């Protein structure tokens, strides 16, 4: 068991492939009350237990043909929130994990990627300071 502080402090998002993302989102909205927004996903707010900071988790269906989950061939991708993306990726590399060279930086924050031992793409997200508690641009 690790004695270091946790690298991941929350679930940033659940992303999955769907044959008809719009229809599926409508079903979740109608039958489960999921607040699907115009961009096709939903945002679930929560508060970090360690800092009390406002945060959110994104739920979003993607088209079945998406290439975003590559190199994984799995039908879903998990996104985990981290405070220090560079340190987390460096530690994972040192531990022999399959850290991808793929990086994305944008208004929502910084993203890095690692493959788990079963071939799932794991997206690590360091939210931008103004995106950490904002629900509007998710």
Image (cartoon, grey):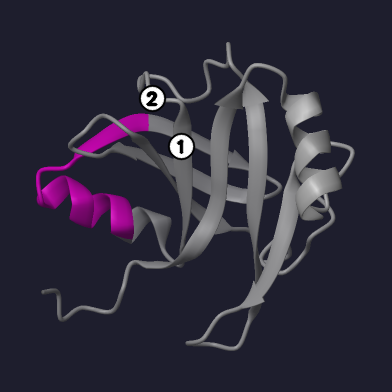
**Gap in angstroms between the C-alphas marked 2 and 1:** 8 Å
Give the residue at x 65% y 74%: 46
Q: Residue furthest right?
A: 38
- Residue 14: within the magenta? no
125 on left or right of 89: right
Give the residue at x 65% y 51%: 58
Can you see residue 45?
A: yes
Place of residue 27 in the rendered image (x, y in percent of width and height, measured from the top left): 79, 37
**Circle 2 is placed at which residue position?**
74
* Label 1 crowd (10 A; few <14 / some 14-19 / many >=20): some
Q: Quadrant of the N terminus?
A: bottom left
86 on left or right of 62: left
Depth check, front residue: 2 or 38: 38
Residue 19 sits above or below residue 50 on the image: above
Can you see residue 138?
A: no
76 on left or right of 107: left
Quadrant of residue 100 in the image?
A: top left
Depth check, front residue: 108 or 55: 55
Place of residue 90 in the rendered image (x, y in percent of width and height, measured from the top left): 24, 52
Q: Which mark is residue 77?
A: 1
Give the residue at x 12% y 51%: 94
Cβ–Cβ below 8 Å for labels 2 and 1? yes
Residue bounds of the magenta highlight: 88-101
Q: Secondary structure at mark 2?
A: loop
Quadrant of residue 12 in the image?
A: bottom right
Q: Secondary structure at mark 1?
A: strand
């Amino acid at each position: 068991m690790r004695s270091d502080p946790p690298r991941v402090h929350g679930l940033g998002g659940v992303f999955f492939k769907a044959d008809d993302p719009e229809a599926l989102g409508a079903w979740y909205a109608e039958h489960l009350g999921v607040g699907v927004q115009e961009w096709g996903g939903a945002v679930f707010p929560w508060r970090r237990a360690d800092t009390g900071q406002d945060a959110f988790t994104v739920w979003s269906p993607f088209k079945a043909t998406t290439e975003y989950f590559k190199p994984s061939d799995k039908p879903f991708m998990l996104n985990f929130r981290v405070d220090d993306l560079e340190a987390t990726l460096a530690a994972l590399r040192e531990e022999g994990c399959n850290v991808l060279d793929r990086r994305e930086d944008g208004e929502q924050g910084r993203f890095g990627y690692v493959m788990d031992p079963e071939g799932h793409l794991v997206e690590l997200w360091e939210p931008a300071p103004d995106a950490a508690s904002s629900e509007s641009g998710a």
